[in-house]
Image (cartoon, rainbow, N blue to C red):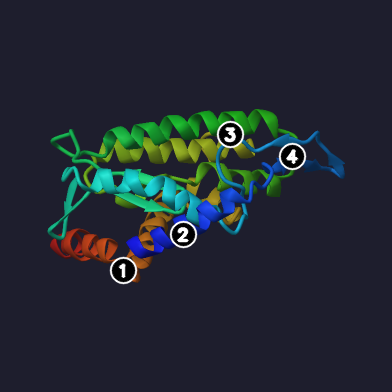
Amino acid sequence: MTCKYLAFEENFSYAQNLRAPPNVILVKWNNTLSETYRLTSGVRQGGLTSPVLFNLYINELIEELSSTRVGCQVGGVRVNNLSYADDMVLLSPSVNENLMDDDDMERQRRSIACRSNMLARRFYHCSKQVKVTLFKAYCQSFYTSQLWYRFTRSAFNTLRVLYNNAFRVMMNLPWRCSATDMFAENRVAGFVALVQRLRVSFYSRVALSNNNIVSSVFHNVFLKREIKDL
């Protein structure tokens, strides 16, 4: 890895000596071009050298984080950051001793309530199919629901009821109509079915991962936990 960086640094120094002019950028929208401006920071999207330049920029930060020896213990390895392309996730031990997921469920409940009310107001006159599509896109993305494990029945039911009511609001349905019937009629997954589907999809992808860290987490945490619950 070090040799590759040294080789690239020599080529980069040579390219700098060529004194190429700064990148000139413009935006095209609806067949209309904006005024040109110069790129003074960051890397050009789609550029051949952009990935390597970004790696040179971010590599020192990743090495510094890895050398701190803090983070989560995964399969005997201390992990504190997961980096891919221009995304970075920082890992640390939880400060919540009981590790309950009720707070996360409450955040999801408030988020769906806001989104469903906004969609119901803005798209009130749209067709039923459009409303169903919007509901699936904006009200079924339960972020981190695949990891829900320790939660109270009350928190789960509160979120389930909100999910059902959000669909009723979107579709302008009576409050006391059957949740099972309205979801079946519109071919939309109910709350329990949706959470189970997201969980199975996540577990399947993790189980087939070639990443050593991801594979270790699956076999040492998720798999043991599921076997214990059987």
Which residue corresponds to mark 1?
207
Q: Position of residue 124 (x, y in %)?
A: 70, 33
Earlier along the polypeptide chain: callout 4 or callout 3? 4
- The residue sitting at 66% across, 43% down in the picture is 131
State yes or no: discs 1 and 4 in contact (Cβ < 8 Å): no
Query: Which corner quadrant holds the N terminus?
Result: bottom left
Q: Is residue 85 above or below residue 161?
A: below
Earlier along the polypeptide chain: callout 1 or callout 4? 4
Which residue corresponds to mark 2?
8
What amino acid type is highlighted by mark number 1? Ala
Res 1 visible: no
The quarter of the picture where residue 38 lies is top right
What amino acid type is highlighted by mark number 2? Phe
- How far, Cα to Cα, is label 2 from label 3? 58 Å
Which residue corresponds to mark 3?
169
Which residue corresponds to mark 4?
126
**Residue 54 vs residue 181, the one in the foreground:** 54
- Element on which disc 4 rests: loop
Dot 1, how many residues are within 10 Å of its Cα: few (below 14), some (14-19), or many (20+)? some
- How far, Cα to Cα, is label 1 from label 4? 41 Å
What amino acid type is highlighted by mark number 3? Val
Closer to the eye: label 4 or 3: 4
- How far, Cα to Cα, is label 1 from label 2? 36 Å
- How far, Cα to Cα, is label 4 from label 3? 13 Å
What amino acid type is highlighted by mark number 4? Cys
Closer to the eye: label 2 or 3: 2
Earlier along the polypeptide chain: callout 1 or callout 2? 2
